[in-house]
Amino acid sequence: MDAPDIPSSTPAAGRPALLRGWRPWAIGGVLILGIVLYARSGKKDAAANPAGHPVPVAVAQARKGDMAVRLTGLGTVTALNNVTVRSRVDGQLVRVAFTEGQMVKAGDLLAEIDPRPFQVQLMQAEGQLAKDRAAYDNAATDLKRLDGLVQGGIISRQQLDTQVSSVAQYAAALKSDEGAVESAKLNLVYSRITAPISGRVGLRLVDVGNMVRATDTNGLATVAPLQPINVVFAVPADNIQKVLGQTAKEGKLPVEAWDRDLRTRLASGALAAIDNQVDPATGTVRLKALFANDDRSLFPNQFVNAQLLVDTLRGVVIIPTAAIQRGPQGVFVYVVKADGTAELRTVEVQGTDGDETAIGKGLTGGETVVTDGLEKLRPGSKVALPKPAGAKG
């Protein structure tokens, strides 16, 4: 007879089952306890060290000196006068005497219209003038004869008056004929189209062989002078009083033309004119500067950045613009103190010129300001300054 199965109740048999039941809960509890202890330890460390771990930053040294205050505006290069060359008479274009893009002087031949019709008109006008002059001379001779006959009582005074009127009519005809001759000569001159101004010729708009008319709107080509040349740009209306004040005090203010990226200076000139009204759509005022453009670096309709020198700040503290921050307390910078901690310092900005800003109050020359890594800083934070170039870690 088989013996009945008796459940084992020994400790060795029961331990694995018990461990299998509580092991996940024990591990979770241990982790939670570790997190709580770590957080408390961190709070104690933070209370003991408010600055926390050093924050890596980039710094720059404030310096004292002079700084130019400029207004920058997007501008367009414009020619002093842009002329469309048109024919002043009707006719067939028989010659183009310029090369596209050529520099020409005022009076240079650009094109020629068939002159033969105007030469014929001149011959006709001169023939009519000669005919009427002969008639006039004959009438004037008869007048002298009749005047002597009247004095001798041979003819009446009425005949003399009639002859006087005939001479006057022939004289008027001579005036009209002379005008026709001059008109024909002028048309002959107009058949040679010359440059009205000096400058660069644009692309040809009409080819040889086409009929051109004085009423054509497109013309034959355009001529635009390059030396000197203007730049028209706009500045905020809030600054116009300062510009007017400096213009009255200093005269013509210097203006520089830079490329689109503000990396290359193209030309230097002077302020020539200020518009008489504010553009309500943009809140700006248009200014015009004149450039000699000796090297022809400026070209009509080119976009440039114009920088107008308004003032020069003397003996101010200059720092990189990247160090300037703004917050509820106003404009401020972070200054690195001797103990390696960051101090929040409110400052007064006097002016900005590109990457540099002039500080009126709040900083002195030689102090170190933070220019990068500002988002991680708090007052009193320790900072890690960059190692000098060539230094070993």
Image: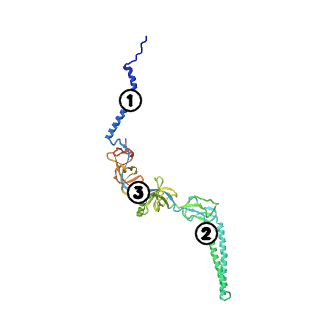
Q: Is residue 288 left or right of residue 54?
A: right
Q: Is residue 215 above or below residue 165?
A: above
User: For the residue labelled by badge 2, is the local secondary structure a helix, a strand or a loop?
Assistant: helix
Instruction: Please report whichever mark, 2 or 3, sits nearer to the chain's N-terminal start.
Output: 3
Q: Is residue 76 above or below residue 57?
A: below
Residue 299 position within the rendered picture, expressed as x and y whole percent measured from the top left: 51, 57
Q: Residues within 10 Å of mark 3 (few under 14, many from 20)?
A: many
Name the residue located 37 percent from the left edge and 31 percent from the top edge: 29
Camera sees residue 223? yes
User: What kind of residue is marked 1?
Assistant: Ile
Name the residue located 39 percent from the left edge and 53 percent from the top edge: 357
Residue 363 position within the rendered picture, expressed as x and y whole percent measured from the top left: 34, 52
**Who is closer to the viewer here, 356 or 109?**
356
Instruction: Please report whichever mark, 3 or 1, sits nearer to the chain's N-terminal start.
Output: 1
User: For the residue labelled by badge 1, is the local secondary structure a helix, a strand or a loop?
Assistant: helix
User: For the residue labelled by badge 3, is the local secondary structure a helix, a strand or a loop?
Assistant: strand
- State which mark lies toward you, 1 or 2: 1
Q: State the image quarter where residue 19 is shown.
A: top left
Any mark on residue 186, and which? 2
Camera sees residue 145? no
Quarter of the image where the N terminus is located: top left
User: What kind of residue is marked 2?
Assistant: Leu
Any mark on residue 69, and which? 3
Q: Is residue 336 above or below residue 122?
A: above
Any mark on residue 112, and which? none
User: What kind of residue is marked 3?
Assistant: Val
Q: Is residue 316 left or right of residue 304?
A: left
